[in-house]
Amino acid sequence: MLQATKVRLYPTNEQKEFLSGQFGAVRFCFNRSVALKKRFYEKKGISLSIIKELKPLLSIAKKSRKYAWLAQYDSISLQEAVRHADKAFKNFFAKRAKYPKFKSKNGKQSSYHCTSVSVGGNWIKVPKCNPIKAVIHRLILGVVRSITVTKDRVGDYYASVLCETGEKEPEPIKVLKESAIKGIDAGIKVFLTDSDNQEIENPKGLTRHLKALRKLSKAVSRKQKGSHRRKKAVAKLSKFHRKVSRKREDFQHKVSKRMVDESQAVIPESLRIKNMLRNKRISRLIADAAWGNFYIKLAYKCRKAGKLFVPIDTFYPSSKTCPRCLHKFEGLTLARRRWICPHCGQLNQRDYAAALNIKRQGIVQLKAAGHTVLRQ
Ligand SMILES: [Zn+2]
């Protein structure tokens, strides 16, 4: 089983300088790959294979005078940056992501290392740099597979240490109880409603924080580019950004743990379906990031516990269907939180009904995948 641990780093000034060069080299390789691919495609209509045609260029480049500086840095991390660019294009062509953007010096920086990496009681080691001081709260057990060093927008350094613990992942449950299968309907106002009729509200203050964030980012755009005042405003914004995202992370960890603890299988609607059903007025960005990250947490917590995470990917009008008699109520508008089924007379709570329907679809999918679902 792989286990990731995040630690805070305290590089010396000299190490900061090295890391800044390291991040720059990674950025350079990524941006160069994206630019070359784009240029060949737009001018000559040729679709370059980044891995096949661009990766070998790296070692040639390092021998040239112009790019010799790349040799000061971990070569695997540079290859990884090229691979990363390749993946970004693949995701774009598969419609999973937007067109790859160039990485900027001002955003979050990161660099991936997987050879000659090690961790001690209060340090980590990546290639071509002496050990960097680290504060490690949790014991890191197992064989270190990789270390990803990052610098966030506030300017603090972290490392994510990935270890192989040697433990085996539990086998996924084969026979499930119907009562332990949980359908969930993720929303905007209410973060989620599950098929046991539990409603989980968004954390208090998050909406207020989002308003404050908008205000701070407006303050940045009003300041003149390159000015000292703008720099200060950007620093303030970055710090606040981090605070909000930490709060959201913490909340998502708690909720996903609870959902997994309470069930044998967790069934949400896939993000593809959620996108199809989305209300246009809802800020895309916020919802996307929130749901996507939440699903990732649910998925790995399930996997670690031998439980099942089964997003439903077939279109199903989950909020319009009566969970009791399956009548489809076409007249349901977005504003209505409850409705009475014209066919059987049941009073349905919109989100709860959706969660129940999602659960039923999930059971169909589980059975189709060879699981047994007991009626208890
Ligand atoms: Zn009905």
Image (cartoon, rainbow, N blue to C red):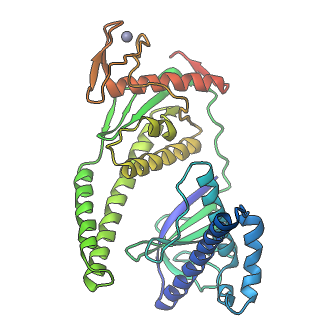
Residue at 28 percent of width and 85 percent of height: 228
**37 sits left or right of 22 in the view:** right
Residue at 28 percent of width and 79 percent of height: 230
Residue at 52 percent of width and 24 percent of height: 361
Q: Position of residue 325 (x, y in %)?
A: 42, 10
- Residue 141 in view of the camera: no
Please tell me in which quarter of the rendered image ligand 1 is found: top left
Question: In the image, is residue 10 above or below residue 355?
Answer: below
Question: In the image, is residue 60 above or below residue 244?
Answer: below
In the foreground, 223 or 143? 223
In the foreground, 30 or 7? 30
Q: Position of residue 250 (x, y in %)?
A: 37, 54
- Total residue callouts: 0
Residue at 58 percent of width and 57 percent of height: 3
Q: Given the current orientation, which residue lies at the most extreme top position?
A: 344
Q: Position of residue 201 (x, y in %)?
A: 29, 40
Please tell me in which quadrant of the rendered image residue 318 appears: top left
Please tell me in which quadrant of the rendered image residue 237 appears: bottom left
**87 sits left or right of 13 in the view:** right
Question: In the image, is residue 184 above or below residue 162?
Answer: above
- Residue 267 in view of the camera: yes
Q: Position of residue 71 (x, y in %)?
A: 69, 86
Please tell me in which quadrant of the rendered image residue 106 appears: bottom left
In the foreground, 106 or 260? 106
